[in-house]
Amino acid sequence: MSPRLRWRKFVSGFMLTMTGVCALVSVSMLFFILGYLVYHGGTSISWNFFTKLPTPVGETGGGMANAIVGSGKLLLLATIFGVPIGFLGAIYLAEFSGGTTAFIVRYAADLLNGVPSIVIGIFAYSLVVLPFKHFSTLAGGFALGLIMIPITLRSTEEFLRAVPNALREASMALGASKTKTIASVIVPAAYRGILTAILLAFARVAGETAPLLFTAFGNSFWSAGWNQPTASLPAMIYTYALTPYDDWHRQAWAAGLVLLGLILIINIVARAILSRGIAVPRS
Amino acid sequence: MATTTTTVPSAGPIAGSRSFLARLREGDEIARMITFLFAASVVLVTVLLVFELWRDSVLPRHKFGFNFFRTSVWDPVFDQFGALPFIYGTLLTATISLVIAVPLGIGAAIFLAELAPARISDTLEFFIDLLAAVPSVIYGILGVFIVIPLMRDYIQPGLKKSLGFLPLFQGPAYGFGFLTAGAVLAIMIIPYIISVSREVLLSVPRDQREAALSLGSTRWEATWKVVVPFARGGILGSIFLALARALGETIAVTMVIGNQPIIRASLFSSGYSIAAIIANELTEATSNLHYQSLIELGLVLFLLTFVLNGLARLLIVATSQRGAGMGHA
Amino acid sequence: MHATVRPAVSVNIPPIATNAGARDTSSALAMRMTITKVNFFYGPKQTLFDVSMGIATNKVTSLIGPSGCGKSTLLRTLNRMHETVRHARLEGEILLDGQNILAQDVTAHRRRVGMVFQRPNPFPKSIFDNVAYGLKINGSKTPLPEAVEKSLRHAALWDEVKDHLHKSAYELSGGQQQRLCIARALAVEPEVLLLDEPCSALDPISTAKIEELLVQLKDLCTITIVTHNMQQAARVSDFTAFLLTGQLIEFSPTPHLFTTPGDPRTEAYITGRFG
């Protein structure tokens, strides 16, 4: 073997090993993150954490019950607002629309998808907070819902389109109206993908903090109804981590573990649903 | 069921031989209108968003014009607002994050697309997708409690000792600042580079690599000199996507960057980013001009990410189409 | 007709000389490559059964047979391309100039046995850089512009591209791109050139140009071509091997195989009774 070839083979082996190192480093980040959260937050997860309100600095035994409920309310609102728009909009795109309209709607959705979440927060602030002169759960839900819309819409459209045309034609040939076809044949055929899309959108907004800074803002106590500012898990983590108090740091870790755990579980479940096979129409 | 026996099935918006009333009766027209309304609301909300950004930034645009981007004084007391420190901080941290994430990400993508057997590649990609799902605030607390001490106690002193002759690595180093923010951003954007680049590399036609190998290339030569250049458009697109993400990132950055509107050459220095200052001052803006200046910053951020995302999409689509259309006669 | 473990193989060539130096001056024919009892497996599935034949030096040998008969598989073992596929396994012996190719360094071997693929696949580079690619990585004693011109002339493409060497290869037509791929392969001066259905994606005129080229290239190197077009095999090749479901059925000088085939299966295939 010539020296030149020997050198080339050495370079090849070396560089390819380096790519493996890059992959290892990148993937291991996930485990480092989980590891730190479990290590620091695992011990702080207690019954108090889930059931008690935040206590003033210095008093231990506080929890994040209001933040957990607050996040729940925000996510509920976001889903109610964002999912129907995304889902029905996608049905329009996949089943009814012509070329130009579809292009405009898709373009708008992609644009909305790329908007940084802080700018979404600004928008929700000027639309829902300023006119009413106070922060509210509604505003937060609106902001999060906006983020959910494009994710839900594009994914749902993709999965609806993936349903073979043969199914549509068979249904119509049997005399079913378009609406019936969509409701009874197409959507059920695509249900796995659509569900996955909704779950992933949900997991995404569960962790969003920036828009909430201007909309739901925060609350040390329970938030009644939908019109008051409310605490949320991400915002609490953000606030607590920046304080100098150890007890609050511990709670921030615990909240981080709970939040990330929730998000990862939803992601894993969503992908598991999807990978169970290509959506097949139920007989 | 009087009309259904003569119904012509149609898949598109043109309804064939059915009359409007027949369609209405069967509910299709209603369904069409309802779904259209929802689809239109997406467009409406997007237009409204852009409009609000534009309308609510009119004061500083008239008062400062383009000087807004050239001055570095941000003084709410005297109603003086210059965006330069925030633009500087945003661009600097984004650059640092790219310098770290691009080699790592492309390297990992090459491994996943060219070397790893399919099942390992898919499993690792699964973990990368999970990494992409980690929310910003989690990176934030890890940044505050893990990365900052690491920087302060080991990395920054180390850099100072070895590369301290460069102005980049001089000055006081407390652990937070541009470098830390850039490093945290790097971890956040790596998954985007990896997953898009991997997909683009996988779509390169097999016979490109085979042709390179059949000329006596080593595996690395075939990958680096043929496959990667073939996919370079899509890889560049993935970098644009990652950059757009880095520019808009708020929470993790504001937790570790120090939040000082100053411009310094040293990477150890505190700084500020566009998203961070909006987050910190929007709800407490002292005057209309202050508020609208922040909105103008938001508009800038929006435009930057808009352009980057658009370019990214074009590049990625163009590259996969080129792969599919090879070998025309 | 069912396949048996050891099918009757009609081989009608003069005695084989394994010394590559021996030329047609003796009654023995020089074989650049010899294939002995090759069995090929993809995972648990076997796709080549006990194939033995030779590739004659400076001649054109064609491999014909219906889809799925294993001709491409066999071709790809000659430059060890099968090793890029994870579950592929080769048993048997393949010699190049008397040396076992499986014992050589694969990168060095592939420079000696080049390949042109079914669909033209130029690199995303200029015409010049495509041809120069192999020269750059392997090192070249002649200056690049000279070597590139030489290859392009051998591929009958020089006159068409000499003023456009720095344009992208994708601006060429399909037939030109394929000739570019041939030039690219020739640039590293391989001893054997393998072509896997090189004209199947091309129009008749481009096909004719390439067939003409192959006959001329014989003097430069040994040529092995896989083709599903029997007339092409009849036109360009000196020797033809007919494969069916992974077995070598017949291997003879081309005129002999097409006019008086030794095996009834060969006759059935060439008369079009099955495709």
Image: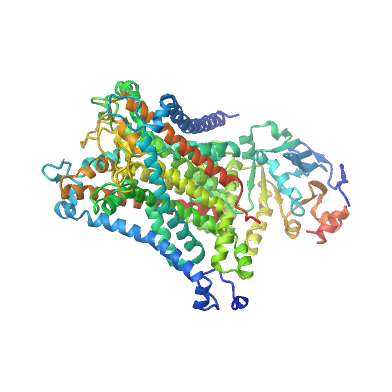
Asked if residue B123 lies left or right of residue C221, the reply is left
Q: Residue at x 34, y 57 (%)?
A: B46
Residue that protrudes farthest toward the front in the picture: A224
- Measured along the vertical axis of the image, is residue C269 above or below residue B8? above
**Residue B221 seen:** no
Q: Which residue is at the front of the view, B184 or A147?
A: A147
Is C136 or A157 nearer to us in this picture? A157
Q: Of B33 and C56, which appears nearest the observer?
A: B33
Q: Quadrant of residue B84?
A: top left
Q: Is residue B157 above or below residue C156?
A: above
Q: In the visual, does B48 lie left or right of B63?
A: right
Residue B168 position within the rendered picture, expressed as x and y whole percent measured from the top left: 27, 30
- Give percent across and percent down for residue B12: 53, 69
Q: Is residue A49 visible?
A: yes
B259 above or below C214? above
Identify the image's colour scheme: rainbow, by chain, secondary structure or one colour: rainbow
Of the 4 image quadrants, the one containing the C terminus of chain A is bottom right
What count of labels does the image hold? 0
**Outermost residue toward the left in this view:** B78
Residue A265 pos. (x, y %) = 50, 38
Taking depth in this image into account, of B238 and C158 the one nearest to the observer is B238
In the rendered view of the protein, which quadrant contains the N terminus of chain A?
Answer: top right
Residue B91 location in percent, x, y? 29, 41
- A81 to the left or right of B292: right
